[in-house]
Image (cartoon, grey):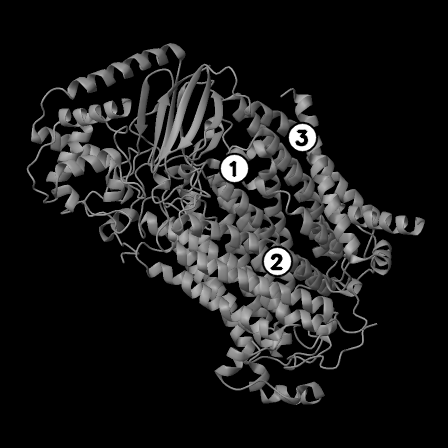
Amino acid sequence: MGMIRIISRSFPLTLLPLTARAEWTLNLSPGVTEISRSIYDLHMTIFWICVAIGCVVFGIMFWSIFHHRKSRGAKAHHFHEHTLVEVIWTLIPLGILVAMAVPATATLVKMYDPKDAGLDVQVTGYQWKWRYQYLDQDLDFFSNLATPREQVSNEQAKSENYLLEVDRHLVLPTDTKIRFLLTANDVIHSWWVPALAVKKDAIPGFINEAWTQIDEPGIYRGQCAELCGKDHGFMPIVVEAVPPEEFQQWLADAKAEKAAAAEAANRSWTLDELMQRGEQVYLSSCAACHQASGEGLPPAFPALKNSPIAVGDVGAHIDIVLNGKSGTAMQAFRDQLDPVELAAVITYERNAWGNSTGEAVSPTQIADRLGAAAEGEGN
Amino acid sequence: MSHILKRWWRTLLGVLAGFLGVQSERRRQEDFKEGRAIHFVVVGLLMAAVFVIFVIFLVRWALSLSGA
Amino acid sequence: MAISDTTGGMDTTAGELHEEHHHGPAKGIGRWLFTTNHKDIGSLYLWFSLLMFLTGGVMALLIRAELFQPGLQLVEPGFFNQMTTMHGLIMVFGAVMPAFVGLANWMIPMMIGAPDMALPRMNNWSFWILPFAFAMLVSTLFMDGGAPNFGWTFYAPLSTTYAPPSVTYFIFAIHIMGASSIMGAINIIATILNMRAPGMTMMKLPLFVWSWLITAFLLIAVMPVLAGVVTMMLMDIHFGTSFFNAAGGGDPVLFQHVFWFFGHPEVYIMILPAFGIISQIIPTFSRKKLFGYASMVYATASIAILSFLVWAHHMFTVGLPLVGELFFMFATMLIAVPTGVKVFNWVATMFRGSLTFETPMLFAIAFVVLFTIGGFSGLMLAIAPVDFQYHDTYFVVAHFHYVLVPGAIFSIMAAVYYWLPKWTGHQLNETMGKLHFWLSFVGVNITFFPMHFIGLAGMPRRIPDYALQFADFNMVASIGAFIFGFSQLLFVWNVIQNVRSGEKATSQVWEGAEGLEWTVDSPAPYHTFSTPPKVD
């Protein structure tokens, strides 16, 4: 069943001190937005209220534990009700909480006001990655975990931002009101960046709203906060906040890069080139389920090694990668990867782990296929 | 007539005491001697509905104050 | 635990003085399979719950072992999710709830002067379907695709469209558990309302009985809701409906509303009997009547209604409209205070008493302190804007473990130590009991207190591996978990030792104990109160 996998060779390594260490903290971070700071203040206020109440209650309790013990000759007094005292000790905390509700309501009202945003970003949760679409900017990309699998399995020392690093950051301008539209492709995810105090569930079939306005440039890391399956712990979020001018530059660069990638699809690629590129793509996009060894985790995640799809008809193989398989965890990758990446990864799957079809799938083949499908939809 | 009204009034007071979480022993004795369980259940459900309406108005009032 | 009724020759001589002991239990396995005796069934529930507690505990230790260091050492992420799911389900439905039902079975008839439960055959049935439900649930671990892996809250569509095939067994197991709980609840209500000894008016009911009466009504009200939600899942999975499937026009958030409509009262189902137990134990060892008995009864009764009005505070981040957020925040805050201040009543009971600190009292005091800490973090979680930072982090894990482990579980242990001499006829071994208490107390705090810190620092719950800044406190928590986990073996040893031997206990057992259950012999004869006692 393979319920428990002992990674035997990893044990000596785990006993070594971790090469990278990160400072631990005890408390919530005040964050870098107005909202996150007011949340932090609310948090500290209610915390100190609890501490104060705790001191009184536990103080009285321990006082009687000490003074009213039988071994010190204490005789029980026979009182067992006092309605006025009870009413008072109920109304005081009630009053404190009502007072607490006032700033809480004010903060909540602000959090629910996404009006006048300068930039709209659609965030879509996938098993187990995030997709960011800059609406009205024609820019759309996926953000995958960048920590190598070897670090997770303790075969390599862990880097400083272990499990909190991605291949493409969500770059956002500072001092701009940004509205997020959140949804999901498969199950419920939750997009959370503590420093921005934004946490909102991404739910299939729903579009949720949230907003932020970042005051300081910097890199802010977060994670998916709603259990979303096997790799729930492996879909981090990295926000890179840059000044607005720098953001415009980045936007232009990103678009140029996208055009260049489209251009690359038109040249011819050798089998070796495709295999090399394909391996990278496979490891970041496919290995979470089908495993680096191609053996998968059946029955949920079938093996690709010697699979009828990967060594069979190439058309069917392209089809399943492009369009996914409904009712299973196999996603449609047509929007997630560009034609070069798609061609490379299909080529890789058909030629790795002893799948020796020797076939190379060219990026133009994929582009044609995608073009034809797009035309079909157009009609 | 006034006797019935008084009994319902007592029940109402008992339910409100429950919502606050404080009741005196004397009142409790009276409630259990004179009150009927079904009255408490009916009034309890009614007051729960009143509580819901009260909180809804509280929310509306808070929203109108904050201008949202 | 009632075994000693039949085995100890010394014990039966004491019992023979009473005519109610004219016939004893049947012999052999048949005694347990066909029993309709409330004490036997109570013991079955308690032993079953102990077994489940240890099973769920092993799963918890596996989770904590994996989280001891960053990186994956022991288990795959998929199996990790199966462990968190099964741990939650087994602890909630297999350990805590059956333990309270077991205590109710043993103690309620003896506390109200009844000869047995009102519906003894149904009592047998409601216990005996439980082992089948859990055998089915646990068997999913060995199935193709593994056990349920979607968390004990089983949010759709992860638990429907994307669930492993074993989810169908899970649904069936939940149905059986629900049927068992409903039957148990009906039995308890029928017993309390109809079987009280003459003179045992509702006004005189011990608080444990009161709290169970209200809990039983809650159970009857919400278990059908749970059954409904899993049935909707079943329909989605096998019969082509789309209750929770957005692609078919359904609504994944509907699932959460229905689940938490069950789930929030369920929280009270797991804590009200604990309130009852603590309200029995603290007066005994303070040698003083409970402070504000009337308030306790009224507050508990109003919880039965008000706990249905706050469910969406578990869902502050799903995108409720502002009006909804504010409603559930206000309602939660308003309701929390009158229930939370009951802690003051226990403190006032101890105040100016004559305190001694036997094992049950130690557990009860720890309950009051640590449950209050869980209550404080609960208050913090009620503040909706701040909940956006706390939600689904280890802060929440710390919160609900504080109310459930040193809350519900400590109360169960306090109850077992408190009533064990009555069940077995043997005085408690205080040294061993106190050793168990201190190890548990220290272990529980080392385990769960650091979880507040890692939650605030930003660690989401239900992840098998984590970033490096969470490493230190995770290691501390894991060490605490192993201390807590292994010290429970002492509990098992204490109970078994007490069943087998020990100093002869008196009827009253504890100096300050009051109530009908302390008027019968220790061990309690197989049949008590065949002739109703007179209560004045």
The amino acid beneath tag 2 is Ile
Same chain check for tags 2 and 3:
no
Q: Is residue C205 above or below residue C505?
A: above
Q: Considering depth in this image, is C502 or A240 the residue closer to the camera?
A: A240
Q: Considering depth in this image, is A51 or C324 the residue closer to the camera?
A: C324
Residue C491, horizontal then vertical, whole percent: 52, 67
Q: Is residue C501 above or below residue B45?
A: below
Q: Is any part of residue A213 visible from this angle? A: yes
Q: Residue at x 46, y 27 (%)?
A: A195
Residue C499, horizontal then vertical, whole percent: 55, 77
Q: Is residue A2 above or below residue C123?
A: above
Sort mark 3 into few (<14), some (14-19) or many (20+) by Cα contacts within 10 Å.
many
Residue placed farthest to the top in the image?
Answer: A245
- Residue highlighted by disc 2: C220
The amino acid beneath tag 3 is Val
Residue placed farthest to the front in the image?
Answer: A379
> Left or right of C279: which side holds A87?
right
- Residue highlighted by disc 1: C390
Name the chain letter of the residue that bears numbered label 2: C
Q: Considering depth in this image, is C168 or B63 the residue closer to the camera?
A: C168
Name the chain letter of the residue that bears numbered label 1: C
Q: Considering depth in this image, is A363 or A372 the residue closer to the camera?
A: A372
Nearer the N terminus, badge 1 or badge 2? 2
The quadrant the C terminus of chain C occupies is bottom right
> Left or right of B56: which side holds C95?
left
Same chain check for tags 1 and 2:
yes
How far is the residue under mark 1 from the one under mark 2?
A: 32 Å
Secondary structure of the residue carrying tag 2 is helix
